[in-house]
Amino acid sequence: MEIIVTDEMDERFIDFCRSFGCVLDEPQVVLLLVNYTSTVGCASFKVYDADSIEINSLFINSLKNREELSYKLIKQLEKIAIDLEFSASYASLDEEDLALEIFKKLDYQIVSSDDEILIKKEFRSLGKTS
């Protein structure tokens, strides 16, 4: 499997991502997990605020290894966010969302739970020195 990362926004790519539930209305990072000729998963984030990203889609097109694939996509999004010098990640989920348990296992904490549950993870600082 390979992870495809692109910053080009052509219509074919936008339509393809939308078919997996990825909303591309704002600039964001989109990862597609491809297995030979089929797309197995999709995950994306957009800028939440000056210091944070928001994971706004996570889709796995397979019942097999669903949790493992979800972890890998989320961890890759986090790595990209850290490389871009963001310090935290948010996600909004419904209470019944199966991904909530996956995010909790990845050290996300609930910060509010009104109509939707807002979760957050602070990235550990690598202690940059000058």
Image (cartoon, grey):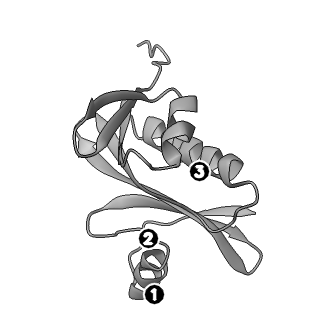
Q: Which mark is nearer the camera, 1 or 2?
A: 2
Nearer-the-camera pick, 50 or 98: 98
| Label located before the other in sequence (3 or 1) | 1
- Is residue 106 something that shows in the picture? no
- CA gap between label 3 and label 1 equals 22 Å
Q: Residues within 10 Å of mark 1 (few under 14, many from 20)?
A: few
Q: Which mark is nearer the camera, 2 or 3?
A: 2
Image position, residue 62 (x, y; %): 69, 66
Q: Label 1 amino acid?
A: Arg
Specify the quadrant that holds the C terminus: top left
- CA gap between label 1 and label 2 equals 15 Å
Q: Is 15 drawn above or below residue 101 in the view shown?
A: below
Question: Element at badge 1?
Answer: helix
Q: Label 3 amino acid?
A: Leu
Q: Residues within 10 Å of mark 2 (few under 14, many from 20)?
A: some
Instruction: Determine which residue is flagged by label 1.
Output: 12
Specify the quadrant that holds the N terminus: bottom right
| Label located before the other in sequence (1 or 2) | 1
Image position, residue 116 (x, y; %): 28, 45
75 displayed left or right of 29: right
The numbered mark at residue 21 is 2
Q: Label 2 amino acid?
A: Gly
Instruction: Report which quarter residue 2 is drawn in.
Output: bottom right
Question: Element at badge 3?
Answer: helix
Q: Residue placed at 50% from the left, 73% from the top?
A: 20
Instruction: Determine which residue is flagged by label 3.
Output: 73
66 displayed left or right of 106: right
